[in-house]
Image (cartoon, helix red, strand yellow):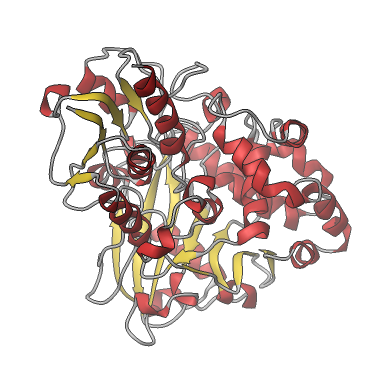
Amino acid sequence: MLDAVVVGAGPNGLTAAVELARRGFSVALFEAKGTVGGGSRTEELTLPGFRHDPCAAAHPLAVNSPAFRALPLDRYGLEWLHPELPMAHPFPDGTAAVLSRSVGETAASFGPRDAGAYRRLVAPFLPKWDTLVRDFMSLPLTALPRDPVTLARFGLAGLPPSTWLTRRFRDERARTLFAGLVAHVMAPLGGFATGAVGLVFALAAHARGWPVARGGSQAVSDALAAYLEDLGGSIHTDYEVKRLDDLPPARAYVFDTSPTALARIAGFGDHYANYRYGPGVFKIDYALDGPVPWTAPQARTAGTVQIGADSGEIAAALRAASREGRAPDAPFLITVQPGVADPTRAPAGKHVFWAYGHVPNGWTGDLTDAIERQLERYAPGFRDRVLARATAGPPELAARNANYVGGDIASGAVSGLQLLLRPKLSPFPYATPHPAVFICSSATPPGPGVHGMSGHNAAKAVWRRLRRT
């Protein structure tokens, strides 16, 4: 009998398997697709030689993850490449605010009226970032805070809505960039704890940047898989699990799946019936005949570029997708251009590029024209550089990754109490109605992103149970 079986080979499932194998437990991992990766994959989606990331591409959370930093992933080929700027947010007038590794450069891009306010916002947390991120991402009840005072101070700043936090800024440039940071998790700007979302992304950039993985995001998953096999774990792909009886006998079962799928496989009935899924996304991967022709010079050297004219436009786009049930007329876009740091991703002189906008969950329309109209506002002539495009709306994203229910790449709405307490209002979020079954996907704390911490935290709950029994 195995000690543990893990279902789902996304970053969290792989991390959970690695953490258990490191502690001497026998582990087997089962994945429905032909390769490991989940939301951290790389594929030729458009033309030969153009290597795209179907989901995650820039990795501020991965490079700062306490779980990943404790593992020797560099020995298995993972190398972080940093663009000159982690992120830029251009404006219609051709200027841009930036999120730089330097706090001073970031503050200066907001203008003199808000530079001091931004420095004061991040100053209490940046010197203690490593401890803070470990405490923040290990909650709840998986580890005692190492610095409860700083964590409490962070909570006071971050638990109110982001719109409260941005009142300290007098001009729109800082408010707009910060609104874009919050929108990365598709949360309404006025929601509970959205200030913390924006702060985490900003502090992550100042601490270690927003890098890409050399060769593509698949490198993260491949490194975890190679390490797991070196530890004696086994990986089985093309193995779809429809019920618990499909799996070999084990003392514990760990699911990197949506709560909906887990309830169906394990026979939990309506245990997760109140779990809410959020907006979906419409994503386009491009093969380009040259770099994106941004008007703002800063955007040309940034790995990630946010597109939204001001905080009001961003808020309206989020509101349309999450509350009004319609696609926004001017979608807020998150775009990534890996080639500014990793020229191996496309043939010489060419580039890969992706962009996505938010749409209602399960939406079946086509947002291509609206996305490209937005891009043309900030990069005139963009369409002329498109060699090929691969589009994916909510149905295609859900077919590609079953955890993206209705196209929700966050694996559950990141709003209200569900931002912190997911998938149930429980101090033990990784446990399920069955004492030997656990959940470790992005539907558990600390939530979405390629960081492995949900798998790391769930693995702690599993090995504590295995040692007790």
Q: Residue at x 68, y 45 (%)?
A: 199
Quadrant containing the C terminus in the rendered view: top left
Please name the residue shown 67% across and 65% down the image: 101
444 vs 375: above or below? above
Using the rendered image of the protein, determine whether residue 344 is visible from the camera's viewpoint.
Answer: yes
Residue 313 appears in the picture as rendered: no
As drawn, is 261 to the left or to the right of 198? left
Q: Where is residue 271, by image quadrant?
A: top left
The percent position of residue 355, horizontal first and vertical second, equals 43, 60
The N terminus, quarter of image: top left
Residue at 22% from the left image edge and 19% from the top image edge: 266
Tell me residue 124's x, y (percent): 81, 46
- Nearer to me, 194 or 147: 147
- Residue 172 spot, x, y in % from top left: 75, 54
Query: Count the marks: how many?
Result: 0
Q: Picture coordinates of residue 82 (x, y %)? A: 54, 70
In this picture, residue 197 sits left or right of residue 441: right
Residue furthest to the bottom in view is: 348
Q: Is residue 184 left or right of residue 27?
A: right
Q: Is residue 262 above or below residue 104?
A: above
Of residues 311 and 167, the one drawn nearer to the viewer in this rendering: 167
Decide: is 49 above or below 423. Answer: below
Which residue occupies 72% across, 35% down?
147
